[in-house]
Amino acid sequence: MASRLYAWARWMVRRRRWVIATWILLLAVVGGLGATLHGKTSTQFTIPGVEAQEAQDLLKERFPPAAGGVVRIVVAAPEGKTLTDPAQQEALDGVLREAATVEGVIDVSRPVEAGTVSADRTIAYSDVRFQDEAPEVTEEAKEELATAVEPLRDAGMQVELGGSAMLPQTEAGGVAELVGVVLAFVILAVALGSVVAAGLPLLTALVGVAIGLLGTLFVSGFVEMTGTATVLALMIGLAVGIDYALFVISRHREQLTDPGTDWEESIARATATAGSAVVFAGATVVIALAALAVTGIPFLTVMGLAGAGTVLIAVLVAISLLPAVLGVFGERLRPRPAERKSARGARAPGSWGLAWARGVTRTPAVVLVAGVLGLLALALPAKDLRLGLPSYAAQPEASTQHKSYDLLSEGFGPGFNATLVTVVDTGKIPQDQRQGAVTRLRGTLVADENVAAVSPPVPSRAGDVVVMAVMPKSSPDAEATTDLVHRMRDQAPTIAGAGGALYVTGQTAMAIDVADKLGEALPLFIGVIVLLALVLLAIAFRSLLVPLKAALGFLLSVGASLGASVWVFQEGHLNGLLDVSSVGPVTSFLPILLTGVLFGLAMDYEVFLVSRMREHHEHGKDAAEAVVQGVSSSARVVVAAALIMVAVFGGFVFNGDPIVKAIGFSLAFGVFVDAFVVRMTLVPAAMALLGRRAWSMPRRLDRLLPDVDIEGARLPAAVPAASPYVEKKAPRRKTATRV
């Protein structure tokens, strides 16, 4: 691999203008497609085949009015007044008449008639039902409704909007994310010792992210995609794009500290060595994210492929656009004499990287035991992991969705926001037995210890589908609500015995079904990822023990990150600091997503760090010294790369969307733990204990595996820079040709 990348980089440098022009053209084309042909991203996390989705499909087919999206107008009376006062009623009736004229609305409930007024008559709600399903309700219609309710605010009432159609769009690009990018630039400037060199990783990463993100938007016009998928593509693409460029540029500038190194030769060798590690590490990220498809869950598959596509572009940028850009700067990136002295000092005995390596490898067994016990302690809260999707309580406290949730809980009890929908398919029940079967079911539901109320049965026009709303006593995120859903579904055989079918759906039931499905898929996915790590690293390092050690370290990192996520988002610690609006279950797809993304990023550091160890070993160092020199020569870059990722991911912790917040926190924490505890501490200690055995491989297996040479052992000898003092040969005289 290294030899081919060496030749490839030379070709890129010599044709740098054409390469840069090609990338600019690609950005323009993809940008045009993404800006003009993009689709609408979804806010719904659904899985075909689960019971809640089957019920929604049944309603859409045979009871369309019950399947439509709902905007719930929640009203609180002014202090000292009630909503049944004539003036308040008149104002409310006028607004509801206006709401009924909004395009797509098929029904607007009247609170007094529908019985949706609280016992103290201070809080009420009206359901504005649309013909279209919740994800299809247009932003224009919701804005029109928001305008229609303004007279109620003018009359002194508090008005908030909730309901299934009011799920907010996931967005990125705020001030917090920008702060992460600024921090990344500062880290780059310190690590590379040059403002110009620090700007190049950001420049190339932004080009790659722009192409990846705009390409993702273009694909959203043809494939249903959640807003979280685009944010994930931005988050991962930016982090790996900066890191991959840092790996190559830091190697290039390290080589240029030798005044005798030709800059074009240095670019080619940096791309061949660090670039090989980038290609291999990037391939692991791409495969890990694409492997999300094995879960069989469409929205997660699309999310993984969107992230994988952006990472693939980041790799291509690092080995094509970046060498061309480095060629444009040429000699100007060579460190000045003071910088060269500093760079040499960084590698001299007594430098912090060397001191750290020697300290870790001096008592490796003690370091290993202490590190493993510490990570297991961090992972301990994960034993209580509960999965779910965030309710409106998790939205920012200033949002109308969160305020509507609080008002409904205050007026109707905590279980109101967890209302479940029981759908009974009575089409195959004899007509004279339908009412009796539904009445018996309702009686059973009313008698449940966690049911506060059950609405009267509402039949479809044809009478073959009946819907009942069930209000629990517990909140949407409570474990008791999950147990209630399972008990309600246990009643299915009684309906089936009469010839019908029973389904439980609604937002809460859908969240429970998604969590259950993802929980079932997690062990399979972790198994695939661990197997993938063993195979890829065995190919990279011609070893069995190195991959085994890497996989175990990765599992410790995932466990620690999940434990920290449970501690914060489920148990409620640090809520004020991280602006977490409400505690609840961990986002259902977070463990799978964290496993896939963190695996790829952890392998980045593993490949870069261990490849430097193997490089020193290939050049004659004994096993122990190769570990020390490998850590010493890569410590600054690995630490800088990890801090950049923590800064980028950490910026998303302050995003208002609770799902993005949880993803940002878990990835930032996971990368920090994996880089500083696992890769920089446990890996050198384990390698020191393994000694020469770390590089052993059974001969038969060694012959079967391809030799990728990511260390550049077979590169040609370095070409020295041309010296201005070398005497030039006189041009050869032309010989006259006799005719």
Image (cartoon, rainbow, N blue to C red):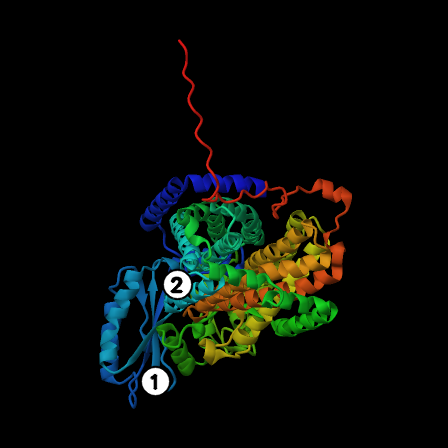
Label 2 secondary element: loop
Snapshot quadrant of residue 564? bottom right
Residue type highlighted by circle 1: Arg
Residue 641 shown left or right of residue 460 in the figure: right
Is residue 455 among what the camera can see?
no
Q: Residue at x 22, y 76 (%)?
A: 151
The residue to which callout 2 is attached is 172
The residue located at (52%, 67%) in the rendering is: 668
Q: Is residue 172 above or below residue 273?
A: below
* Nearest-to-viewer mark from 1 and 2: 2
Mark 1: secondary structure? loop
Tag on residue 121? 1
Separation of marks 1 and 2 at Cα, in angstroms:
40 Å
Tag 1–tag 2 contact (CB < 8 Å): no
Residue 242 location (% of width, % of height) = 46, 57
Which x, y percent locates residue 233? 45, 56
Front-most of residues 597 and 450: 597
Q: Which quadrant would residue 378 be assigned to in this image?
A: bottom right
Q: Quadrant of the N terminus?
A: top right
Q: Earlier in the sequence, mark 1 or mark 2?
A: 1
The answer to which of 51 and 226 lies nearer the viewer is 226
Q: Residue at x 35, y 74 (%)?
A: 400
| Front in this rendered view, residue 441 or 303 | 303
Q: Which mark is residue 539?
A: none
Mark 1, Cα crowd under 10 Å, few <14 / some 14-19 / many 20+, is some
Amino acid carrying label 2: it is: Ala
Q: Is residue 312 left or right of residue 700?
A: left
